[in-house]
Image (cartoon, coloured by chain):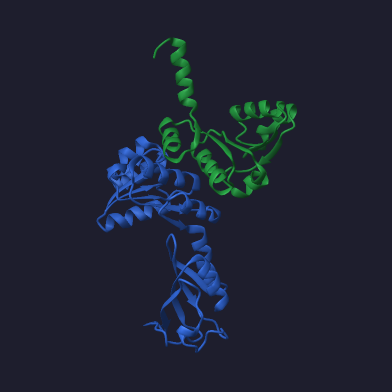
Chain colours: A blue, B green
Amino acid sequence: MFVIIAGGGKVGYNLAKELIADRHEVALIEKDKSRYQVLAEEFGESVIYGDASDAFILKQAGANRCELLVAASGNDNDNLIICQMAKIVYLAPKTIARVNDPKNETLFTKLGIDQTVNTTNMISALIGHKLGTTFLCELLSFKNAEIVQIEIPEGSPILSKPVKDLGLPKDTLLIASIRDELVQVLKGDSTVQAGDTLIALTTKTGEEALRKLI
Amino acid sequence: MKIIICGCGKVGTKIAEIMSQQKHEVTVIDRDADTFRKLEAITESQFVTGNIIDQDILVKAGIEQADVFLALTGDDNANLFSAQVAKELFKVKRVIVRVDEPVRANAFSEELGLNTICGTELIADQVKKKIGVK
């Protein structure tokens, strides 16, 4: 796959490295001259110096033939405009934007960015998870659905009831439970125990209802 | 009319001055409170210090009641971002956005229907006129 990455900070750099290792073709755009020089030493001609929201720079990176554009900078305004430019001017088939301020996530989705990665929310959810303060943690997020991981606490009202009788929220599916590192696919008559980790497919509103239920 | 002006540089200051003289209710947003000094001396405008891409700052400036939203900073992407927040999330009726880079200004006005003003094109036109070339 040919991927353009805008922004060569820690996120963009590591993504480029992984994609290249997986034999994908990568163009990495960086607007800071000294950072560009560091990146060019490692990636050579795959790095382009310039502002990725500039149509000319996008073209130089090959935006007219890219299969995916990832805007990975630390600036939400740059990330949004870069994705929009790639879509409007070069008809990029798919764009993914890093969202730094959680408040901006709905705006990005509304404005047609195919996928968002909310780094701030992810990190705080993971830390909360490690501290044991959050029992629900988002693993993957799509435009209209998400996959979450849920730790079932002691005393949860759903214990020992069959899955089909739980009254799960609309568009929510419990996929599997993990107990002692063994994964079991959940069926209508399966039950869950305290300490199990569940993997569920749900929606934003379903997530709220799931929290209440569990 | 209630008018929000983003950016208190030369352009923002000039527009704020004109609008307050015409008795419109003006609120100016800029990251740097020092830029407000000139306007404070000559107008009755309101001032909010903060980043225009932060929705909380826009609410503080009264975007929910605004009739007109002008994104006039020197940063094209910040302008385009906040203009789209104003138009799509807060449904402000009239949103005008300054975009100095001509291709970007064109792309967003033609494809996304934003009301853009391209300072670069305007200056280029004036220069052409003054030298007498087409």
Q: Which residue occupies 34% across, 53% down?
A: A16
Above/below status of A211 relative to A118:
below
Q: Which residue occupies 67% across, 46% down?
A: B60
In the rendered picture of this protein, how many numbered marks are placed on residues? 0
Question: Horizontal and vertical percent for residue B50?
Answer: 63, 43
Q: Nearer the viewer, residue A195 or A127?
A: A195
Residue A175: quarter of image: bottom left
Q: Nearer the viewer, residue B121 or A51?
A: B121
Question: Horizontal and vertical percent for residue A171?
Answer: 45, 71
Residue A59: quarter of image: top left
Above/below status of B42 relative to B110:
above
Q: Which residue occupies 62% across, 45% down?
A: B58
Q: Nearer the viewer, residue A76 or A188?
A: A188
Q: Residue furthest bottom?
A: A160
Relative to A123, A60 lies left or right: left
Q: Is residue A39 visible?
A: yes
Relative to B38, A30 lies left or right: left
Task: Classify the position of the N terminus of chain B by image quarter.
Answer: top right
Question: Horizontal and vertical percent for residue A11?
Answer: 41, 54
Question: Horizontal and vertical percent for residue B4?
Answer: 64, 37
Q: Residue furthest top?
A: B132
Task: Classify the position of the C terminus of chain B by image quarter.
Answer: top left
Q: Is residue A75 visible?
A: no
